[in-house]
Structures are given as C-alpha cells and as structure tokens.
Image (cartoon, rainbow, N blue to C red):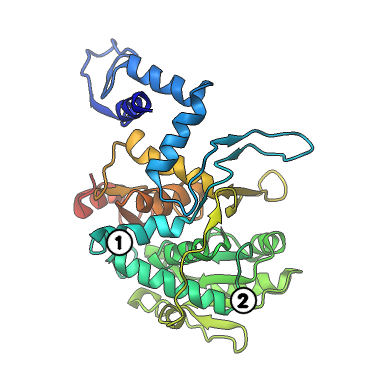
Amino acid sequence: MKNMRRQLAAACGALQPRARARRPTGNRSKGSLAFRVSRAEYDATFAAATHLPGRDEFWLDVARREIDWFVEPTKALRPRIPGEHPTNDWFPDGQTNLSFNALDRHVAAGNGDRTAIAYHSTVGGNSREISYQQMLDDVASFAGALRDLGVEAGDRVLLYMPMIPESAVAMLACTRIGAVHSVVFGGFAAAELAVRIDDAAPKVIIAATCGLEGGKGALPYMPAVNESIDLAKHHVPSVVVVRRKEEAAKSVKYDLKPGRDHDFATMVASPSRADPVPLSANAPLYTIYTSGTTGDPKGILRDNSHAITLKWSMAAYYGTERGETFFAASDIGWVVGHSYIVYAPLLHGCTSVMFEGKPVGTPDAGTCNTNVRDIDCH
C-alpha cells in the first residue's frame, strides 16, 4: 500500500508539462516537453493502475483517499457477466454522495468562505463569486424544495439552462437527493427538446427565462420549453423557472403558469433543507444526450463511481491543488461542462470559473485570455 501511495504521488501531474523546450525551427521532436516525473515513474503508475493483481488495490486506495464515503468500498471492480449484469461496476459495495463531497465536506473543513463558483459574464449577466457556504445553503434548500415537489431518488429532472450559477445549484441539488439530472444544451429547439423529454420522462423541468447572447441580445427559453411540453407525449407536472433580472434580460417577459410553474428563487429560499442521501457508487448520477445528428439522440448514463477518477484527475492530469482556480471553457450542456465546470473542481475544493459568453464575439477572440487574467486562473 505504501508503495502504491508513492507511485500515485509520483503520478500526480505526470501529464502536466512544466515548460516547452525551445528547439530550432525544423528540429521538433517528441521530446520537446519536460514533464514533472520521469517516464519510468509514469510507466510504473500506469502498470499499477491497469494490470492485475495490483490494479484493484490501486484504485481502492485512490477511492478511499479522494472522496468521503458513507460506506467505504471493499471491492474495486465487479466485472461484467453476460446474462447476469451487463456492465463493469466500480466500487459496487460503496455508498457516497457527490453533493456532500462537492460542498458539505469543504464547509465542515473550515473552507466555507472559499469561492466555489466564479461566475463571469461578458454578455450582460450579473458576474459574481459564490462561496462554498452559499452554494451549500442554496443546494440544500433547493433540494428540499424539489423533494417537496415529489422528486425522489431515481426520478429524472431535465435542465434547459444557460451558463449561470443556478444551473450548478440545480445539478447538485438533484445529486443530493439521488435524482438523475439531464442537462439539455440551451441552443436546442423545441422539437429536439421534446424528444429528450419523452426519453428521459422527467418529473420536473428546470429552465431559465432566457440566455444572453451578447450582441444578439436575450434569447427567450420558455417559448421553446412550453412548445416542447405540448409536443412531448410524456406529461411534465412541474416546471421551475429562473427569472433573470439583469438589465440585458429585461426584454424577455414571462408569467408563471399557475399550477405548473414554480419560481426558482422562492424555492432556494425554502426552509425545507435536504440532507445528502447515501447512494450506491453505481447509482445513476446523470444522463446526457448525443446531438442526434446520426439518428435519434442517445442518452448516455454515468453513475457516481466515475467521480473518483474525476477527482483524482485534478491533480494527476492538471496539476491543480485545492484552493486554486480552474477554468474549463466549455458549457454545462456538454459532458466536459459536467465533468470540469461542476463536478471535478468542486470535488477537489477549487474555484470553478463559470463563463457565460462565447470564445469569439463577446466581445472578441481574446475573451478567454481576458478571463484568465481578470479571474486570476492558475
């Protein structure tokens, strides 16, 4: 076990280059990157992580150190057996909760004042920083309000949201009570959204009144949501609406539909807080759909166990330490946004930059570099 810990420590950052070696033009080689560990150390860690008999003990050690468990796993992998269970199940006897790991444990460790989400908008949003304590308060209250709407572990909740902090609150609130979130990219039209509603069969849809598109102005979301509900065969009993109040969003007016719609801000203020529910490592965490360009959209399901490698990757792949700032210039509508805007940075105790804007045109192609400078990304 001690040898594996040394190997793991050596592997942390193995894929993160220190500096690019300068070589004469026309004389580039595969050795032009200098890494923080030797090739021999990397190979030893790779072998320990992938080869029997040491592989399972390697990943059990990672799992026990990287996240907290209600029930600590004793087995790393339950291999697929045709006709019995169709998938390889990681840490099958462990129980955890990723909302707890992303928020509660950092607050309990005295880091509640640390910034969890640094929301930066170049399209008129209200840029702000949200602490781990505030995120925990909002997530616990919103999770309790979802539970009051009848959402239980295993139920699906569909999100049709822009890149705003409320999206992360909604995702982590679902995770907290064991609901399975399915985020649909805000650029999809009503017909595409309806297909995903029918497949996911959500008990609740969470949507914003609009997304902000810079020079294009505010893009209303609720007309597409209402049309998709009319098109879908599945009945959606409840819709939660984030009513944006920024100056750039004032052109979009929306009145809640009585009996169906609920105000997000009111739900976040709910006194009905929810504690994190112990969940199997193999319990579903979220589904995310393919684009549908090659047929019907396919729902890809990820369970809680993949969070172990997400958490581990923050140091092992990206060389990031707790308390540092991490910027993934993606969107929560895509899997990279799930992994490296919401889950991995918060599991690791980092500040995650949530950027509402585009790589170009908001205002120009230098916007991402400007974010790195202004938000002090490491």
Name the quadrant containing residue 231: bottom right
* Residue on which the image places disc 1: 108
User: 67 left or right of 19?
Assistant: right
Task: Give the amino acid at mark 2.
Answer: Gly
User: 39 left or right of 278?
Assistant: left
Most foreground residue, 337 or 320 = 320
Q: Where is residue 52 in the image (x, y as percent from the top left)?
A: 54, 21
Q: Is residue 224 visible?
A: no
Task: Give the amino acid at mark 1.
Answer: Ala
Dot 1 falls on a residue whose secondary structure is helix
* Residue on which the image places disc 2: 150
Q: In this view, does 23 lie above or below 49?
A: above
Q: Is residue 45 visible?
A: yes
> For the N terminus, which image quadrant?
top left
Most foreground residue, 64 or 373 = 64
Q: Where is residue 266 in the image (x, y as percent from the top left)?
A: 44, 83
User: 18 left or right of 39?
Assistant: left
Q: Which residue lies furthest to the top in this view?
A: 27
Q: Residue at x 57, y 82 (%)?
A: 261
Name the quadrant containing residue 319: top left
